[in-house]
Image (cartoon, rainbow, N blue to C red):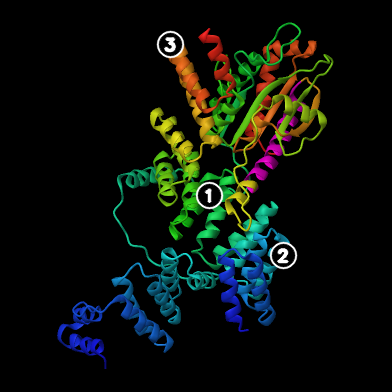
Amino acid sequence: MDRRHFLRWIGKGILGTSGYWLCARGVAWGKSAFEYALEGQNLIAAKRFAEARDVLKEAVRLDPKSDWAHGLLGRAHHGLGQKAEAVAAFREAVRINPADTYSRMMIEIITQKPIRRLKKPVRPLTPLEKKARAEEEAMLSQLTPEGGLAYQVKRVVIDPGHGGFDSGAVGPTGLKEKDVTLDLAQSVKQKISEKGRIKCFLTRTGDYYIPLSDRTVIANQYQADLFVSIHINANENRKAHGCETYYCSEKASSKEAARVAAFENAVLKYDEPFKKRPGYINIEEILFNFERRLYWEESGKFARTFQNRFEQALPFKSRGVHSANFFVLRRAKMPSILLETGFISNHDEEAALKKASIRDEIVAAVIRGLLNGRG
Amino acid sequence: MDVDDLIFQGADYHYKGELDKAIAKFQAAVRIEPQNEYAHNQLGILYAKKERFDAAFREFQKVAQIDGHNTYALLWLGILYLKQGNLNQGFEKFRRIIEIDPNNADAYYFLGAIYNFRHNTAKAIKYLKKARDADSDESDTHYRLAQAFHNLDMTANALLEYQRTLALKPSHTKAINGIGWLYYNRGERDAAIAEWKKTLKMNPRDRDAIFNLAKAYNDFAWEAMKRNKPKEAISYWKKTLGVDPKNKAAVHYLKKYKA
């Protein structure tokens, strides 16, 4: 029997459990963390894992910064089949020394399959946590997590195209695109708000100019579920007429779509949010690309839905759905579409766009698109 | 050579970034022990890092065939399905993992992220909270949870989760930008500006912070114009150009009102 075991035995007899711990911790005799760790290592080699665990716990208590002791403690727990505790100890070892290959490997091996969860210590709530909990209790009682993977729209940002010094296209008799788009957007907001199912925000509420970048910023500001940019088309050929819907995609669906996108896009170059790092898998980049692809697919569905509504409701020819890489749509972190509700350059359609009844029909079609908004 | 030695050497090469050498070691390991799940999983990760995603997929599938409860392999199969754009298959894998392991933070995280992408916020919150409670050390879990709360205007919870994100990863600029919007939307504009400036200090090319600041300064300029304070408006448009020198609105209105 060595000195420690002897003293533990004595301590048990005299002091009961607390005496056992006092002695086991070597408080009185100042045994070093290194000595405990070394002893633990020998016990592991002898497959005496329970004893090893106890002395290694002592080692890490005395020297919490020893990756070696934490790694050994992980091995002792692992030897006892205590996977969760083993992972916790190996994690601590890796946290202290990221180059600890063995501990890293053990974490990966053990966590390939389910392990028990360790209980976390409970601590008092901070004032913000208390406020958050009260808010959550109030809010989440009203929300029942339901619905499957169908896209949900509860907030929409409507973007009246152009504004201020940028009048957009101007009709043969002087009707300005910026005025029509603002009127349409404001009516949509008013009517959709009356229905109460969808919160609606506008990118501008008056005759002023907003750069393209600001428009998607506003959509992101309100965490919108859908961004709808309203425009009126124009062409040098005054015979061109009809309504069409665009959505964002990497490749333009036609030369004409590419031309429209090039015209609408700012001179800003696109930024790439993730830089390539060879030999590294960026999960968030995978999710980002997946999210963007989902939004583009969803934008396509919304575009088809809106165009169907226009076909059914408007006295304009349907020019179909197109896709292109629009800056105004690309930076939106949600599905986004761009409506071209007629050609202001066409005499008949300019005249139609002046009529309140036609504008009402456009607004009604947009609202139906929003409320039923799925392809 | 012993399989354990090969695996240790492979792991060591892997951590040191010597991917080809690591692959060679793990390939040797699975030749000796074809049922070794860890070696196949490591090969899967290594192939994915080399952008050989089909080969990676095959390795993880092998593991799933050896043991359908190897949640690590199932997780990576789910991630690779997402990479392919296959929502339903990815979703199924993550759902299967939580059937096997109701404490799997990663699977909850991906399920929460998927619901966030579908803007099904209540469900996103449900799963992301489980991810957070199972493992609170992942900054992105807190960030996505913050986004979900933000989407529901649950601002205290959103702020708390953004702050938790930053406690784990102070350079998480998206969280800083999110806090900026929380402040901005409740009228604390100086605080919002300070947040976006913080982002720009970390990354002067952060487009979100640049555009957020430009938008805010343009808003302030217009409000000043409404109050008939053109000098103040001009000062804000100048600030806009300070962060976004090509901002068309600021360029135009500065020219117009300075004249």
Q: Residues within 10 Å of mark 3 (few under 14, many from 20)?
A: few
Pointer 2: what residue? B55
Mark 1 touching mark 3, by CB under 8 A? no
Pointer 3: what residue? B229
> Of marks 1 and 3, which one's residue comes earlier in the chain?
1
> Element type at marker 1?
helix
Pointer 1: what residue? B123
Query: Does residue A132 show up magenta in the picture?
Result: no
Q: Residues within 10 Å of mark 1 (few under 14, many from 20)?
A: many
Q: Quadrant of the C terminus of chain A?
A: top right
Is B150 rendered above or below residue A97? Answer: above
Q: Residue at x 33, y 62 (%)?
A: A121
The numbered mark 3 sits on a residue in which chain?
Answer: B
Q: Residue at x 61, y 78 (%)?
A: B6
Instruction: Provide the residue span drawn in magenta.
Output: A290-314
Is B204 rendered above or below residue A108? Answer: above
Residue B44 placement: quadrant: bottom right
> Element type at marker 2?
helix
The amino acid marked with disc number 2 is Ala
Q: CA distance from mark 1 to mark 3?
A: 47 Å
> Of marks 2 and 1, which one's residue comes earlier in the chain?
2
